[in-house]
Image: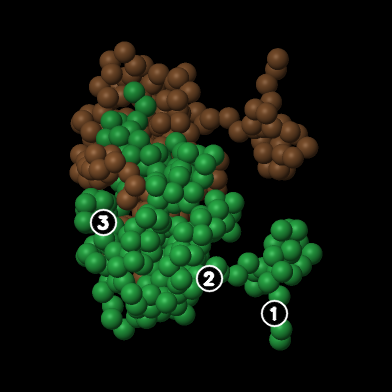
Chain colours: A brown, B green
Amino acid sequence: MQYPAPIAKLMEGFMKLPGIGPKTASRLAFYVLEMKEDDVLEFARSLVHAKRDLMYCSQCHHITDVDPCRICEDTSRDQTVICVVQDAKDVIAMEKMREYNGLYHVLHGAISPMDGIGPEDIYVAELIKRLQENENIQEVIIATNSTIEGEATAMYISRLMKPTGIKTTRIAHGLPIGGDLEYADEVTLSKALEGRREI
Amino acid sequence: MQYPAPIAKLMEGFMKLPGIGPKTASRLAFYVLEMKEDDVLEFARSLVHAKRDLMYCSQCHHITDVDPCRICEDTSRDQTVICVVQDAKDVIAMEKMREYNGLYHVLHGAISPMDGIGPEDIYVAELIKRLQENENIQEVIIATNSTIEGEATAMYISRLMKPTGIKTTRIAHGLPIGGDLEYADEVTLSKALEGRREI
């Protein structure tokens, strides 16, 4: 016997989460014992609630508790632009910016032949179908990550979209704000130079 | 709207835990959405279970799911020695060592006038009472931390125990194994010198 069974069990639960090893799990588990019972119950309920009540929006595939999601339903938003992102978290990052007012499409991944992820494993077909069914769309902004996979996905989608004639754009690459030229890597620098604009 | 409500709620729950800020909370919450439902339910149940079913042992005040705890109940252990520690976690550290086979007494804190914690706020009186009621005890090992508070508590207990005539010992201070003399602080070094033994 080392830990009493309920603590060992709770530690196991914590250790299933990313970045939590035995030491952190033990610290968290002991902390839970000191928490108010109401807070613990609330936390336990929110775990189950989040897992059970969230789904993907049938239109944009963003996570949501109502279908269609609040962004798709919001008629005050610009219905002519769709921003394509890899992840639900990316939608939240975009929304935090408070400058984009169009719709989204979440791919839930990126094409990565190395990991055996092809176009059929992410929501690309759904995007094309959505564009065919909705004649309002005038621009598709591809905001996948600046990684090899993200770039490959952007390229693939832009090629698929050529026949539709809809304007397709890619977010800019370059030096991040606050970034130092001295410490920028060559690829970023080359992209920044390539994307230069008149001022 | 940024996060759907169930996610925001779950993030709030995670953020109540120590060392978890908004970024980690968001990462963990999104991870939970990808977990198997059974695992999430199991985790939620273990939270409630740990909080509700654990209590302090009426004898040694270690956390336990049965009273008296498994250590106090274990007749194969040496019933003549009590090791006094600050925390339930210290019992687990001692048990991991697998060399100590006596009983424990958990104080749940240390005397700290700075924080307004006096002897009456920790389980000192219970220790003395336990020693008076149990005539088998031959030695009390004080294994509080090597901090000012731990030392003050050790001193206080040893003085209280003088009249009982029971042998009272304090765990050794000195250089940790693998420690470098060069990097040891003066107090540790002075304690190591003071506690030197013939070899």
Query: Considering only order in the chain, which callout, 2 or 1, is on the residue closer to the N terminus?
Result: 2
Kindly identify which chain the residue marked by label 3 belongs to: B
Disc 1 and disc 2: Cα gap in Å?
A: 16 Å
Please determine if labels 1 and 2 lie on a single subunit: yes
Q: Point out residue A28 in the picture as x, y percentages from the top left corner.
A: 40, 51
Res A189 quadrant in image: top right
Q: Mark 1 against mark 2, which lies toward the viewer?
A: 2
Mark 3 → mark 1, Cα distance in angstroms: 42 Å
Residue B169 seen by the camera: yes
The chain under label 2 reads B
Q: Secondary structure at mark 3?
A: strand
Mark 1: amino acid: Arg
Q: Secondary structure at mark 1?
A: loop
Place of residue A183 in the rendered image (x, y in percent of width and height, measured from the top left) = 74, 40
Q: Specify the label residue B197 is tagged with.
A: 1
Judged from the image, the secondary structure of the residue bearing numbered disc 2 is: strand
Residue toward you, B46 or A99: B46
Q: Quadrant of the C terminus of chain A?
A: top right
Q: Disc 3 or disc 1, which is closer to the eye?
A: 1
Residue B55 vs residue B101: left or right?
left
Identify which amino acid the numbered label 2 is placed on.
Thr
Q: Residue at x 29, y 41 (%)?
A: A36
> In this rendering, is residue B162 above or below A73?
below
| Residue to which mark 2 is pinned | B169
